[in-house]
Image: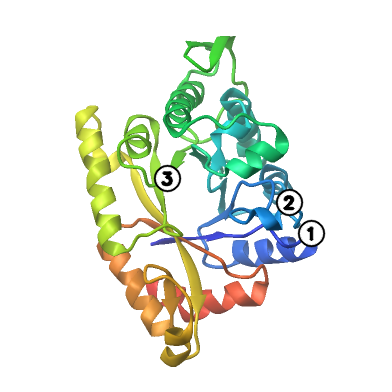
Amino acid sequence: MEFGAQLGLYGTNYWPNIRETVEALDAGRWSSIWFPDHFMPPGNPDAGHGHALEAWTILSAIASITSRAKLGILATGNTYRNPALLAKMCASLDHVTGGRMVLGLGAAWYEREHLAYGWEFPPLKERSDRLEEAAELIRLLFTKAQDEYVSFDGNFYKLDEAPLTPGSTQSPHIPILIGGNGEKRTLRTCAKFGDQFNLDFWHPGGVDVFKHKSKVVEEHCESVGRDPSEVKRSVCLPFRLFESENDFREAQGQPWYCWGTTTMIQDTLGEYIEAGAQEIMLCAIPAKPSAWQRVEEEVLSVFS
């Protein structure tokens, strides 16, 4: 079973904390390390002037100080970067890391962030159209032969005999993770062009929702003529460890969060594994080596 760690980049400008935590994760049981992709603290416009480090810059910094864990952004907002540029960035880091990159891609959702920086924030349908087109373009670049060029004439993106050299060091190519919960468009885009889906359960979720969304992906795969086993299943869970059940009951979390005592959390993770999750990312844990090591020792150790 694979477990990933998503580290926050908000409320801190202290790079040494991030570096030390990443080094501890890479030395431990964690299979992957992820960062979110926002340019200001998300979800609270009043916190817009809070610290927020840029995810791909930080990812580049940790690429050379890790040696084992997979690395990625969960998930890159498609509206922020041209997809061909993103493919080039990811392929370059794939060489730096010796083939440990995963390209996570989503439609983007934080309108205030777009307005703050002067970026276009299209309606949801157009953002979904753009995500699908970007995923198709990136997959073409990732899967082409080394000496081939790619031309692409989409509604939003165009390529004219574009190279991607050097390309992926991975076989068959850098995996494309599609992040998002939307059944009609996002999960269908994953079925067509992705290699992994990731459900974000900051939003309403739970094991039953995970099962349902997995079934939706299977149905989309069948409709586009793809083997569902080619798409890896993963979920990102807000995490908090409590000393007692009484402390947990007094907390103000949502019922679908991965919150509880050690035993409660182990049971919850076991349910996701039984439901078919192949990778579970945990988030909302402080960027301190001791905090992540405690989770590793008290929770993850029973699954190894």
Residue type at the position of mark 2: Leu
Above/below status of 134 relative to 179 = above
Residue 208 picture location, percent across and down: 25, 61
Is 9 in front, or is 126? 126
For the residue labelled by badge 1, is the local secondary structure a helix, a strand or a loop? loop
Closer to the chain start, of discs 3 and 2, is 2
Q: Mark 2 points at which residue?
A: 53
Above/below status of 103 relative to 131 = below
Q: Quadrant of the C terminus?
A: bottom left
Determine which of the numbered discs, if any, sits on residue 38 in the image.
none
Determine which of the numbered discs, if any, sits on residue 180 in the image.
3
Q: Name the residue under label 1.
A: 13
Residue 75 picture location, percent across and down: 53, 45
CB contact under 8 Å: marks 2 and 1: yes
Is 280 in front, or is 28? 280
Mark 1: few/some/many CA within 10 Å (<14, 14-19, 20+): few
Residue type at the position of mark 1: Asn
How many callouts does the rendering have?
3
